[in-house]
Amino acid sequence: MIKFIGWRFGRAFFTVFAVLVAVFLAARLTGNPLEVMYPEGLTPDQEKSLLQQYGLDKPVYVQFGIYVRDLSQGNFGISLREKRPVADMYAEDIGATLKLAGCAFLVSVVFGIPMGMIGALKRRTGIGRLVMSVAFLGYAVPHFIIALSLILIFGFYLHWLPSTGNETIWHFILPTVTLAAHRFASIARHTRSSLLDVLSQDFMRTARAKGLEERVVIFKHALRNSLIPVVTILGLQIAGLINGSIIVETVFAWPGIGRLFVGAVLKRDFPVLQFGVICFAAIVVLVNFLVDILYVIIDPRIRTEA
Amino acid sequence: MWNKKLFGKRTKPPGYLLSMVPMLVVLGMVFALFGTPLAQAKELRVGLQSFDDGDPGLDSYHTTNAAAQMTNCIHETLIERDAYSKPLKFKPALATSWKMIQPTVMELKLRKGVKFHDGTTMNADDVAFSLNRIWQRTRPQFEAVQGRFFYNFDRVEVVDPLTVRIHTKRPEPLIEILLSDRCASIISKEYQDKVGFEKADLAPVGAGPYKVVSFKARQQLVLERFNDYWGEKAPLDKITFTHIPEISSRITALVNGEVDFIFNLPPDQEGPLHNQKNVKLLGVVWPMFHVYAVNMTNPVTGNKKLRQAMDLSVDRELLVKSLWQGKGLVPKAHQFKEYGEPLYMPELVTVKYDPEKAKRLVKESGYNGDPVVLTFLPHYYTYGNLAAQAIAEMWQKAGINVKLQSIDSYPSDLKNIMIRIWSNPMYYPDPMGAFDTHWSNDGWPYRKKFFKPENPKWNEFYEKARFSTNVKERRQAYAELLKIGEDEAGYILLYQPYESFAMRSDIEWKVPTNMRPYTLTFRAGQIKVGK
């Protein structure tokens, strides 16, 4: 087991390091950040002095070495634009993003699993088809279309819900629904297909033959077994939540890291961009790492295969 | 207890109904927590499209459109410019009086007892610190403001704690206009010394009618009335500027009562607000041109006849009609009516449309069909991408082989850029407020050899238009300068854009015609909210 965990940890570490290299190089391929910071130009002396100040005058491999050294010392860099530690900037904004992502995750699970069940158990009825049609829409329609449609209907025409900010519980509804739509749809579809698969298994016939009530058959035998693959995809949803928050936060003026991240890309704020990408990659890798370990605990055969 | 006789055999609910229980619980929790706060009567909530233009501070030196929206409330100048008067009037502000004691020296008496937002008292050292740091270009950040406004200013001399002398390099006919620009505001030296330049930029301390309560870059600025303000107290208790980049969200926020004041609405977004109760629209044609700057030293666009052909083949009437729904304005020359008499010359026409002459000029130019690349920023200027496509078609018809290139920002080295989109706003109500701020020898087009007039008379007329102390001479020289500019065709004016402000119907506010575009004036006498 320790060998397995060690192997997976090493792989996770390598993945994050590969992302670090990729984002470091990709950021520098976008061009000189001073062009965006000083659109009206600088004198050659000023440009040279600023490049020196930001350490951008050195060869890329030297810059990378310095960055890795600083990272290992817990120094994540200073924003070129705001001249503040990037860790502080993310720390200020991460709370709002986590609240939104948490709500979206909760809603997608709470609604997605029951909807998937309805889709499976009532698959030949109107309600079953309706539920899966809604799930299909949630899956197919892009975030920004959902966001703008919700703003138009519930904000502009009905005046029921606010369209910007995060002050009250009401402010959470539209962005949460927008962000949850894809996740909810994905969970509902996976739950449905998994449940249908389980329902056709021999042990279900056995359970019914034992004289168990249908409720017990569904919840205790079918649902439990069908949720194993669903639990697996829940981990992957976290990546989607952070991705989705970038657009959702912009449309709903939500004060989270999504906007910080977009701003860093547009304004070539390398330290902010690098830190965001690395954190994001680390979260995804960590979740996958935990899921891998969870697998081993659930199914020892995987350990053997590894 | 379940009564079998009465209700029959108890049946269990189907599984899918049970599964909906958690959904109902979540919905119940959400609706149980109902409650939306309402704005206070004297609070103004402003939804901004652009919050920092990539330059997040609020120190007075910032020249961006985004900063102009907010810094007008925070900072105070020595001389105050009336925001609306024609002819232009100046009022005492942090200086109570001023006079020229030599052609290049102005002496100003400072107001006694003026408090900064941190409670410190202003004196001559603060004035010298605030202005000298810019005029002596002590940081690269000051390059833009110095090049645009203050390149003729030399230094501030402290005479005594309440007297300063401002030295210019040569006689400055625009000295009052320039000193009344918000970029010439006075900040607290003590505060800057204490917290440092970067921190002070994000939490500025000025002497204006509102003080900063909180500022979160990219997100929100909260201001409160400054009760120790030296002049008439601010009419609002609180102003909240919130960044709402998405236009649909901004419009909905206004209609929903989440904000009270929004702007940057192009004509095609006005429709949804026309029939809204409690909302009124205020349209404005900005004193600003969308411009194509043409590289005069590039091997292709260095050809003057080709540049003239490009200028003559742009059908601006069509652009204004089709893109701006007829609400923008076709320029006649590089000037705005906001200059007022006598500097505005309505009879002067240097912008013309003559597609036939354009075709002739292309032939005469010896143009060999090399691609002319029009490089544009697709989302920076309203309708900028559509205009680029339309203009490319117009140039094609004139016989020019045009290629469009979309980029996210312009490189430092512009030698390979042939044509770039730009804007020329009127920074102050004078011909130089839109011309000198963009086309002077200290501006980037000249420094980067993008703009290089060949006509030997250019410098002579520029000199008079900029520095003559005789208004008639300045007017005449400026007219001559614009005629040369037409011949040089180093810039192609497109149109004056139109935008709308939208606000709660009980707000009384008007666009300040003596200030640069996007300045939000919320001082005493400039806004009324509620009854």
Image: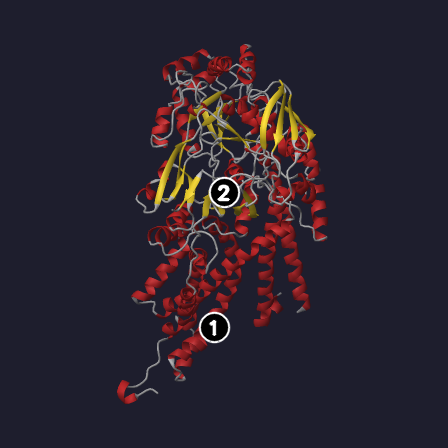
Q: In the rendering, at what x and y percent does residue B290 appear?
A: 45, 28
Task: Locate residue B104: give its quadrant.
Answer: top right
- In the image, which disc is placed on residue A225? 1
Callout 1 secondary element: helix
Which amino acid does the dot numbered 1 rest on?
Asn
In the orientation shown, which residue stands out farthest toward the left? B6
Q: Which mark is residue A119?
A: none
Q: Chain of mark 1?
A: A
Kind of residue at badge 2: Ala
**C-alpha gap between disc 2 and disc 1:** 67 Å
Q: Is residue A231 above or below residue A261?
A: below
Pick the front one: B90 or A153 = B90
Q: Can the viewer see residue B217 in this picture?
A: no
Q: Which residue reaches farthest bottom? A: B5
Which residue: 43% across, 67% down? B29
Please state, as top left, top right, bottom left or bottom right, where the N terminus of chain B lies in the image.
bottom left
The residue identified by callout 2 is B234
Give the structural element (helix, strand or loop) at label 2. Answer: loop
The image shows residue B527 at horizontal and vertical percentages of: 43, 40
Count residues near mark 2 (Cα–Cα under 10 Å), then give few for <14, some for 14-19, many for 20+: many
State yes or no: discs 2 and 1 in contact (Cβ < 8 Å).
no
